[in-house]
Structure formats: C-alpha cells, structure tokens
Amino acid sequence: MKRTILIAGLGLIGGSIAKSLMLSQQNYVIGADVNQETLEYAQSNKIIHEACTFDEAVLMADYIILAAPISETIRLLAKLNNTSLTKEVIVSDVSSVKGTIMKAAGELTNERITFIGGHPMAGSHKKGIEAAKSHLFENAIYVLSPSYRSTPKKVEAMQELLMNTKSKFLILQPEEHDEMTGVVSHFPHLIASSLVHQAKKWQNKHPFLPNLAAGGFRDITRIASSNPELWQDIFYHNRTKLSRLLEEWITEMIDIKERIDNNEKTKIIDYLQMAKQYRDGIPEKEKGAIPAFYDLYVDITDQPGALASVVLLLANKNISIKNIEILEIREGITGVLRLSFYTQNTQEKGLEVLINHGYDAMIQD
Ligand SMILES: NC(=O)C1=CN([C@@H]2O[C@H](COP(=O)(O)OP(=O)(O)OC[C@H]3O[C@@H](n4cnc5c(N)ncnc54)[C@H](O)[C@@H]3O)[C@@H](O)[C@H]2O)C=CC1
Ligand SMILES: O=C(O)C(=O)Cc1ccc(O)cc1
C-alpha cells in the first residue's frame, strides 16, 4: 500500500532522507520548505514527487519528518498540534538535540499525532539540498526516541519507512542522547572552532603560520568548517550539557597546564598514553557523530598528475570514492592521500588495485 510522507525542510538532511525514500515504489514523497528555490530544485531534480505548503501537506501525510533547524522544528510541531488533522500521523524529526524536542512533543495535545524523535547521526560540513545524498546515512547510527504515545509497532513502522537510509537504529532516551552527543559531537565542535581562533590570533604575529598547518591541524579542525547557524542552534538546545562539559574541560586544562609548567614528565606521558589507548580502541568501521569512513592511505609523490593517476586507476575499476584528502604533502617529497569509500567492499577492492599497481597503500595510517 502506498504511503504519503511529508518532509518539512529540504536541506542537507531532509533532502537526503527524501532521496532515500524515493528509492521505494511504496512511498509518495511531498516536500515543503520556506525557500522557494529549494523546492524548485527538489522538484526539478526528482528528489520529491510533489512540492506543497506545510499547511496543505500535513492533511495528506501518513508520516511527517521535520527536517528544519531545531528551533524551527519546535515551531512546526506546535503548528501541527493546532491543525485539524483528518487522519492519524506518525511524526518524527532529525534534530541533533533531543531534549527540547521531546519536551515539546510531550506537550502535544492533538491525539492524531504520534511523535517519535529521530536523529540520523551522519552529516557533512555542507548545507542545503544540493549537498543531499541518498546514501548519506548508510551504516550510520539513526537514533530514535519514542514519545509517551508511541507503541513498539509504530517505532517498527518508522524503522521500516527509513529502511533505505541503510542506517543502524538505536533507541535512546533524550537525556542520554544529549549527554553522549554533547561529549562526542557538540563539545568537540566548540573546541575545533576555538583551535582555529587561536591560530588566527597567532597569525597576526606570524603571517606564515597557515602554511605550517599540517595534517594534524586540518584533521582536528575539519568540523569547524560546518554551518555556523546550525551549530549555534545545537549549542543553544544542548546548552546545559555543553556548559558542564566546558567546566570539566577548563578544570582539566588548568591541571594539564600545571603539569607542563612543572615538567611532570611521567604524568604527561600517562595523560597522552591513556588518550592514545582510548582513541585507538574506538571502532573505525562504525559511522558515528564524527563519521569514520572506509579509508585507505596511499603514499604518492608530489609530481604533476600523481593524484589523477590514483583516481583514474580506481575509476577504471568502477570504484567510487566518497572523499579525497591530501595529508602532509610537502613540496617535492612523498605525501599521503586519504581516500574514503562508501563500503568496506570497495575499500578492499581499492586496496588490491593500488597494491597491484605498485602503490604503497594501507587501510590503517
Ligand atoms: N548538518 C548535519 O550534519 C546534520 C544536521 N542534523 C539536523 O538536521 C536539521 C537540518 O539541518 P541541515 O539539513 O543540515 O540544514 P540545512 O540548512 O541544509 O537545511 C534546512 C532546511 O530547512 C528549511 N527550513 C527552515 N525553516 C523552515 C520551516 N519553518 N519550514 C520548512 N522548511 C524550513 C531551510 O530552507 C533549509 O532548506 C537540524 O535540525 C540539524 O540539527 C542532523 C544530523 C546531521
Ligand atoms: O561531519 C561531522 O564530523 C559531524 O559531526 C556531522 C554531524 C553533524 C551533526 C549531527 O547531528 C550529526 C553528525
């Protein structure tokens, strides 16, 4: 039986979900967005079946996925609550913070609405529908937070609906979700931005500084290139957890400063050793809030065409590359390429092809 799904907010995340829903003949996908250009893009690129206003579309939908910024999602939920719905509807969202959304869901009085909170835990530094991909959430964790009105059957229906995202579902309470994402996603984002600020300040004294920013700095600050408005909204909604994490971190940094000032060698080694051990034990193949992809590391020379040769070799074998990053390349010297693949299978195939052509390639750097 056909089901009608409304996606409200067709940006990076809403657009990606719409694209994955369009893979099933069972789904009729309606899109709504405050941005007319986005709607036109979605329609002309067949990312949705139909474009509609939110007010009209809610009357047709069996499922609604709210994929606008968090504060807008809360407003849309209140609007939906005040709508005379003609049929029962399962409503979900994609917000990076669950506490404030689930609080708003707890205040819903419209008995036709069943709310199940959602958070697909993968993304990009890009925003907008142009960056949307049907496979964005493949192998990523997709958190679901059932509200008081949802039954296991409805949660199952939600998972079935989202099947083509190929993500791994995980049921979490909003409180534990926000605490964990605070630690592994939101707080690291703040620190990444602060490191960039620090570098920017020091550049006043050393104009050459950015040229020294090697792979390590680029790796740790990658997420600072994300959408600032989105992250301000995330910080605001998870401010209590974030504030506590900041307080803990400041205390830890004061302690570390003392150890460095007093050259407490053993304690500093222990501190770094414990971090290394824990970091090395984090699963590589799981996509998390900071996604780990199927990566390959390849040594290349800094010669014209070196990058193109690697890409061509893989393209000739029909191996799609998700991302390419040049790590630690120095003029005239060997550099390292990080190639990210969509699946373990293509990662392994890529490794074989490159090794067979004499490249020094490996899965772990
Ligand atoms: N960007 C990321 O990496 C991730 C974001 N999220 C969550 O996804 C949500 C959306 O983020 P993105 O897709 O990255 O943002 P985006 O900026 O790419 O897209 C947001 C879309 O919502 C539309 N919009 C704004 N207000 C609206 C309203 N009242 N009604 C209908 N449409 C409206 C905008 O025009 C835009 O097309 C946020 O709540 C965020 O927390 C979740 C996982 C990852
Ligand atoms: O790309 C990264 O490192 C991310 O952290 C992506 C991301 C951003 C927001 C989320 O709610 C979930 C994942």
Image (spheres, grey):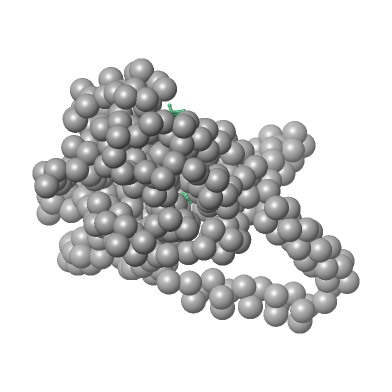
Q: Nearer the viewer, residue 346 or 49?
A: 49
Inspect this view and state whether residue 179 appears: yes
If the image is split into quadrants, where does the C terminus sit?
bottom left
Q: Residue at x 55, y 36 (%)?
A: 71
Q: Position of residue 264 (x, y in %)?
A: 82, 76
- Residue beneath the point at 70% across and 80% down: 270
- Residue drawn at 27 percent across, 52 percent down: 162
Question: Would residue 160 be found to the left or right of residue 233 on screen?
Answer: left
Which of the two residues, 343 or 81, is positioned nearer the viewer here? 81
Q: Residue furthest top?
A: 36
Task: Where is residue 331? Give x, y as percent.
Answer: 46, 46
Q: Is residue 201 above or below residue 318?
A: above
Side of 205 relative to 359 (left or right): right
In the image, taking residue 277 as reference, residue 319 lies left or right, namely left
Tell me if 113 is positioned left or right of 79 in this view: left
Give the image quarter of residue 49. top left
Q: Nearer the viewer, residue 77 or 47?
A: 77
Residue 121, placed above or below residue 268: above
Residue 152 location (% of width, % of height): 34, 64
